[in-house]
Amino acid sequence: MLDAASSTTVRQAPPPPPPPPSLQPAKDAVNTVHKAMESGFFNPITNGDVKNAVGALKGLDATNAKAAISELAKDGGLDKLASEINDGKSFGLGGLSADEKRDFFTEMAKDLGGTELKSLSDAFAKAGGDYHGKADVEALGKAIATHATPDAKLDYVKAQAGSTLDHAADTT
C-alpha cells in the first residue's frame, strides 16, 4: 500500500534551449572573400576569384549572411569586393556581368536586414562605375523592393535616411 509521502511526483526540469545557430559558415565565407580578394603584381584578382567570393556569400543562410556582411563592412572587405565586382578588365580579370550582379543583389536582399543592406549599398556607391555608383545602388534598391522582407525594407529606408548626403555641389 502506498502512503501519501511515497506518491509524490518528481518534476523534471524543462529541456535546455537549443544552441544558437553556428556562425562558423559566416566566418568561413569572410575568409573566402578575403582570400579571393588578395592580389599582387603576379597574382591579379580574376573573374573566378570574384565569383568564388560572391558564391560564398550567396550560399549562406540569412543569419550567417548578416554576420558575414557586417564583418566585411567593418574590415573594409565589402568595399574591396564591390570594387572588384565592378572591375571591367578583360582577359578573365573582370568583375561580374549585369545579370550576375542582379542575382547577387537578389540573394542578398532576401537574406539581409536593413543595416546590412545599407552597408552593401554604401560599398557599391563607393565602388562607383558611374555617378556615385548610381546604377548599382538602383539595381540593389530594386532587389530590395522586390525581395526583402517588409521589416528589412523599413530598416533599410531608416538607415539610409540617417546618412543622406547633399550632392548639389557635386555635379561631375
Image (cartoon, rainbow, N blue to C red):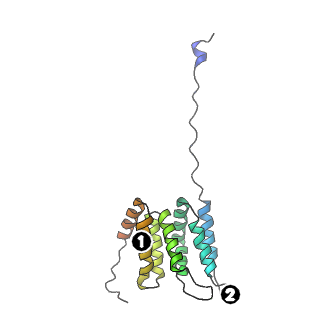
Q: Which residue is situated farthest in the left direction here?
A: 168
The answer to which image quadrant residue 71 occupies is: bottom right
Residue drawn 45% across the image and 78% down it: 136
The answer, for residue 3, to whether it is visible in the render is yes
Q: Earlier in the sequence, mark 1 or mark 2?
A: 2
Residue extending furthest top?
Answer: 1
Quarter that holds the N terminus: top right
Q: CA distance from mark 1 to mark 2?
A: 38 Å
Which kind of residue does numbered mark 1 sit on? Lys
Residue ID at (37%, 62%): 154
Residue 49: where, in percent of width, then height? 63, 77
At 57% from the left and 68% from the top, the residue drawn is: 57
Tell me which corner region of the image, top left, top right, bottom left or bottom right, holds residue 41: bottom right
Residue positioned most to the right: 42
Task: Report the amino acid beneath label 2.
Answer: Phe
Q: Could you tell me how many numbered marks the image carries? A: 2
Disc 2 packing (10 Å; few <14; some 14–19; many ≥20): few
* Residue 83: x %, y % from top left: 52, 81
Instruction: Give residue 101's position: percent from left, percent from top.
Output: 51, 76
4 with respect to 118 (left or right): right
* Residue designated by label 1: 142
Q: Residue visible at 62% across and 88% down?
A: 91
Residue position marked by numbered label 2 in the rendering: 42
Mark 1 element type = helix
Q: Are marks 1 and 2 in contact (CB under 8 Å)?
A: no
Where, quadrant-wise, is the C terminus in this rendering?
A: bottom left
Q: Nearer the viewer, mark 1 or mark 2?
A: 1
